[in-house]
């Protein structure tokens, strides 16, 4: 039991300390950018109390916008106060799936920078099946998500095929395919197949009600069944990596491709399978996003989910559980940041600062060790083996 808790502490220590440092430094930025705080610069005591009050109010607004807002519960049920938490989960759901697409690639020694493009193609597939066909509710959802998975698996698998057969670097190929996906969706939304009737702006018809994911907390909440799909996908990735032969091959190639090849593992097959599965996960994220909360394909449907997925996977140390927790954190920062900006004078950009600082400290464990005087900070994992160690 002691070894188990020591292992948990070793794995969680770096993200926890990085999180703490990011919020402390961001708090300094919040305080020093506030006019009321700077006005008290000549009075040290007032300066400190005003600074602490400003930072506290900003982070309180961040909490109320992402977890629980007592103002929403006032005059209603306590459950209504958790509406911000439901929005956090809605935002985190596609991040979990795209984060897993990047994390799985890390485990196999690959850098899947193409989750953005794979997400977009998944959204396209789910949208088309969702509005073009009419099936029974459960069947329609499965077929729409199946289209998202299949289309994106092919898109991701193509990257693996190019790397396995020609040696093309997956980073370069996936970056280029992101551009292709971005411009492809701009074009396809102008075609008669996807453009909503009597509209000139690029938006597809809304998916049929039978293809929409059911709500889990009533009509007043946007929380939908996509979070259950995301959690099942995370469990599947964990099971695949830790309980199956192909998962062992993924990890073996990620640890040392040359040694894995000597042991009889087909590195080419693992590369293709990994990228196809990563594409399927990211595409599933796009499908869930369309069917669960957006319900219509737009030119900016991908947002920054695919790029944020890289940060989520990095923060989660390329582990399924860590990726889920990191996605929830980023979802909370996104949703809470809007409330923080509206309730205080703190700009929404501070959320990006917090995210960037977290990643900075995660990628530089030596710096974290130095600041906190931690001697045995665990950093060895699938990413540090590929050069992510600070």
Image (cartoon, rainbow, N blue to C red):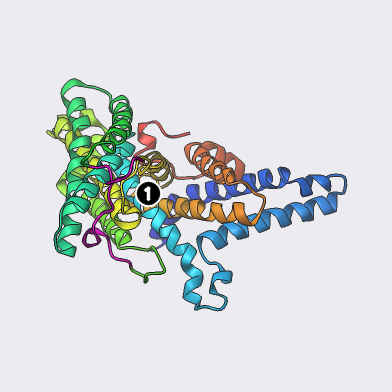
x%, y% of residue 343? 63, 57
The residue under the point 78% across, 56% down is: 49
What segment is highlighted magenta in the picture? 194-215
Q: From what the image shows, is residue 343 above or below residue 171?
A: below
The residue under the point 45% across, 53% down is: 331
x%, y% of residue 361? 52, 40
Determine which residue is flagged by label 1: 95
Q: Quadrant of the N terminus?
A: bottom left
Examine the image and state in which quarter residue 306 appears.
Answer: top left
Examine the image and state in which quarter residue 33 appears.
Answer: top right
**Residue 207 is covered by the magenta coloring:** yes
- Position of 317 with respect to 338 (left or right) is left
Number of numbered discs present?
Answer: 1
| Viewer-side residue, 55 vs 214 | 214
- Position of 165 with respect to 86 (left or right) is left
| Viewer-side residue, 240 vs 140 | 140
x%, y% of residue 390? 48, 33
Q: Characterize the local packing of mark 1: few (<14), some (14-19) or many (20 or more) Cα atoms within 10 angstroms.
A: many
The residue under the point 21% across, 43% down is: 277
Q: From what the image shows, is residue 153 above or below residue 335?
A: above
| Viewer-side residue, 123 vs 323 | 123
- Dominant secondary-structure state across the stretch colored magenta: loop
> Farthest residue in the right direction?
42
x%, y% of residue 145? 21, 52
Q: Is residue 232 visible?
A: yes
Q: Is residue 249 visible?
A: no
The residue under the point 18% across, 50% down is: 132
Q: From what the image shows, is residue 170 above or below residue 66?
A: above
Which element type, helix, strand or loop, lies under badge 1? helix
């Amino acid at each position: 039991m002691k070894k188990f808790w020591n292992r948990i502490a070793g794995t969680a220590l770096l993200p926890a300390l990085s999180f703490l440092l990011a919020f402390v430094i961001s708090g300094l930025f919040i305080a020093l950018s506030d006019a009321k705080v700077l006005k008290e610069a000549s009075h040290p005591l007032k300066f400190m109390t005003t600074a602490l009050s400003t930072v506290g109010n900003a982070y309180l607004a961040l909490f109320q916008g992402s977890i629980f807002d007592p103002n929403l519960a006032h005059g209603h049920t306590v459950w209504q106060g958790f509406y911000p938490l439901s929005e956090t989960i809605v935002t985190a759901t596609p991040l979990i799936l795209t984060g897993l697409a990047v994390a799985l690639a890390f485990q196999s020694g690959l850098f899947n920078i193409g989750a953005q493009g794979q997400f977009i193609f998944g959204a396209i597939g789910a949208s088309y099946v969702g509005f073009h066909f009419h099936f029974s509710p459960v069947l329609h959802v499965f077929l729409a998500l199946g289209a998202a998975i299949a289309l994106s698996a092919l898109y991701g698998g193509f990257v693996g095929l190019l790397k396995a057969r020609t040696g093309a670097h997956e980073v370069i190929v996936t970056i280029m395919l992101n551009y292709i996906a971005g411009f492809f969706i701009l074009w396809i939304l102008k075609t008669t197949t996807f453009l909503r009737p009597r509209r000139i702006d690029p938006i597809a018809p809304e998916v049929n009600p039978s293809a929409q994911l059911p709500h889990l907390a009533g009509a007043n909440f946007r929380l939908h069944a996509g979070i259950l799909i995301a959690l099942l996908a995370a469990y599947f990735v964990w099971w695949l990596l830790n309980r199956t032969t192909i998962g062992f091959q993924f990890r073996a190639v990620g640890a040392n491709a040359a040694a894995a090849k000597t042991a009889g593992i087909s590195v080419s097959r693992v590369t293709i399978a990994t990228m196809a599965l990563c594409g399927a996960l990211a595409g599933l994220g796009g499908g869930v996003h369309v069917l669960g909360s957006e319900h219509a394909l737009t030119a900016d449907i991908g947002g920054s989910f695919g790029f944020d997925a890289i940060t989520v996977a990095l923060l989660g140390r390329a582990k399924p559980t860590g990726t889920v927790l990191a996605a929830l954190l980023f979802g909370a920062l996104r949703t809470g940041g809007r409330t923080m900006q509206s309730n205080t004078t703190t700009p929404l950009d501070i959320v990006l600062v917090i995210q960037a600082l977290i990643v900075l400290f995660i990628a530089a464990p030596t710096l974290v060790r130095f600041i906190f005087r931690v001697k045995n900070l665990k950093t060895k994992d699938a990413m540090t083996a590929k050069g992510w160690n600070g």
